[in-house]
Amino acid sequence: MPSVRAATIPNLPPVVRRFVQYVQIDTQSDPDAETTPSTKKQLDLSRLLFSQLEDLGLDAHLDEHGYVYATIPSTLDDGAAIPTLGLVAHVDTSPDEPGGPVQPFIHTDYQGDVIALPGDPSVTLDPDRQPALSDHVGHDLITSDGTTLLGSDDKAGVAVLMQLAEMLTDDDTPRPEIRLLFTVDEEIGRGVDKLDRERFGADVAYTVDGGGVGGIYAETFNAAEAVVTVEGVTVHPGYAKDIMVNAVRVLAELIAALPADEGPATTEDRAGYFYPHKITHGETGRAAVKILLRDFEDDGMARRKALVQRLADEAVERHSARVSVEINDSYQNMLRYIEASDPRTVSFAEAAARAIGIEPERRLVRGGTDGARLSEQGIPTPNLFTGGHDFHSRFEWNTVQNLQTSLDFVRALVRHWGEHGAAQSS
Ligand SMILES: [Zn+2]
């Protein structure tokens, strides 16, 4: 099975050609930078997208932060009766692994074997470790050369939306007005920090930033952070009997009392967790810990908050230490906002998947997304599959066929909104 430098293959489908072009532009974001975008190189791709959109004759805008906005007009006379549809992807790639220069390779007609990547043979694609590979026998896999991530997260979404824009320029099947949005710094949690919501102008939206084919992601964790601070009593340890209150011991006991089978390393799927992730003070006189609380259910989150408070109360009783608990919500499960504003965002995505012969699968996001923040702000924004796998790694991959499926899916979704979007019932 030949592994070929993607840039040398002449007859790639247009969406794959775009993908290959975009992944070669290093757009890694940087969590330590305070500017927007966090890295200037993200602008290299933003500028390219802006000029390609202008070349398509679209009304496009590149702002000083690197966000790219564009409008694809509706084909309907009464387009205004249908919600304006936002489609979102992010230009940056993860800071977790080297971000460039990316050398994309295509491994045609995959046979289910282990592939050593050409730039670093210690990096392999291995179906034992990456079971989704076994579902892709016969596909043409796309990877990096193994020395960098691939950046399918989220160049796949970028390529799909750009190819969609090109296809829709001479396509008059029914569709609402579409607002494209390419964001920066999503991987460092700031993807919508500088969003101009008025310019975006979408009523409903999707991020095209998900994983394997079929996945529709409408649920995130409820997330909160508890800060537990113990104030101890310090005194010379040789003369401390019945006087010293050692905040370090009190805090350690409290952390140890958190259920060990409810941590990030012991849970998956719908199970939430307690994650004491940082000791911020650790002295006899004062010790403090930050604990992340995660749960898909509201009552589960309430139970987690109550347990932290109870452990603190017990520490007060046992040690006559002063213990304070401060809990702040970080974000909410976005499903509630989606259901409150327009649940069709999910059912239409499922219908569009079926329309192209894909069985949709609702998947959970064990974290947050930019869509969660948009949903909270009143723009219901589920996340959609792109066909990519093993994000943020040097063995990240997508396939020629999955990119095409992802494009077909988003196109069917646009059409579904055009044909059925006017009958808003809520
Ligand atoms: Zn992403």
Image: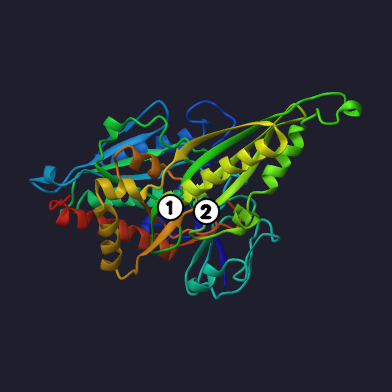
Q: Find residue 120 and report its horizontal and vertical position in percent.
A: 68, 57
Q: Amino acid at mark 2?
A: Gly
Q: Find residue 260 and report its horizontal and vertical position in percent.
A: 65, 55
Considering the numbered disc 1 on the image, is that residue within a helix, a strand or a loop? loop
Task: Answer above or below: position of 124 versus 318.
Answer: below
Is the Cβ of the residue at disc 2 closer than 8 Å to that at disc 1?
A: yes
State which tag comes first along the sequence, 2 or 1: 2
Viewer can see residue 45? yes
Task: Answer above or below: position of 156 versus 285.
Answer: below
* Residue at figure coordinates x 54%, y 54% from the top left: 391
* Residue at figure coordinates x 57%, y 55% from the top left: 144
* Residue at figure coordinates x 81%, y 27% from the top left: 243
Q: In this figure, which residue is indicated by the disc labeled 2? A: 272
Q: Amino acid at mark 1?
A: Glu
Viewer can see residue 18? no
Q: Find residue 317 and report its horizontal and vertical position in percent.
A: 66, 37
Side of 287 relative to 270 (left or right)? right
Q: In this orientation, which residue lies closer to the viewer: 382 or 33?
A: 382
Q: How many marks?
A: 2
What distance separates the C-alpha of mark 2 from that of mark 1?
A: 9 Å
Q: In this figure, which residue is indicated by the disc labeled 1? A: 297
